[in-house]
Image (tube, rainbow, N blue to C red):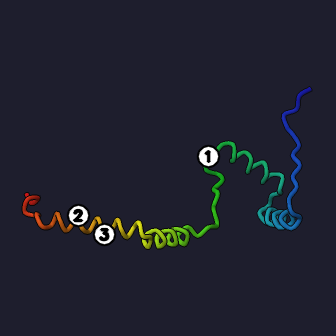
Amino acid sequence: MTTTTAQLNLRIPTKLKETAQLKAENYGTNLNFLVKLFLKKFVEDNNIVEIKQNIKMEKIFDKWVATYFCSPEWKASIKRINKKISELLKDEEKYLV
């Protein structure tokens, strides 16, 4: 005999279970239905779960940018670029159309 269902046992924090159970009851449903609904949607949809990082990327990027642009290598590059621009501007008539 084959069965079309399976039992799923989950271990979750008690407080989470109680809070979720109360919220489900307020919506007129139960955790069993919500878990089945989530799993069904998870299998059907590619965007059901969105993973978010709690990292302030702007701060990390800003710190990196400040460190990079203050480096001796970057300052030397800027000097070379400015020198090249100055050289080009001397002969700008050649480049104007």
Mark 3 and mark 1 lie on one chain; the one further toward the N terminus is 1
**Distance CA(mark 3)–CA(mark 2):** 9 Å
How would you rate the neighbour count of disc 1 (Cα within 10 Å): few for under 14, some for 14-19, many for 20 or more?
Answer: few
Instruction: Identify the residue under disc 2.
Output: 84
Badge 1 marks a residue whose secondary structure is loop
Percent of width and height locating residue 9 = 89, 49
Q: Residues within 10 Å of mark 2 (few under 14, many from 20)?
A: few
Return the residue nearer the eye: 90 or 50. 90
Write down the residue under mark 1.
46
Rendering quarter of residue 74: bottom left
The residue at which mark 3 appears reads as 79
Crowding near the residue tagged with mark 3, few <14, some 14–19, many ≥20 C-alpha atoms within 10 Å = few
Quadrant (top left, top right, bottom left, bottom right) of the C terminus: bottom left
Kindly identify the amino acid type of the residue bearing the numbered disc 3: Lys
The residues bearing labels 3 and 1 have C-alpha atoms spaced at a distance of 49 Å
Which label sits in the foreground, 2 or 1? 2
Q: Is residue 30 above or below residue 76?
A: above
Helix, strand or loop under label 2: helix
Q: How many marks?
A: 3
Question: What percent of the width, then of the height, locates residue 48?
Answer: 65, 51
Residue ID at (62%, 67%): 55
Is 55 left or right of 81, judged from the image as shown?
right
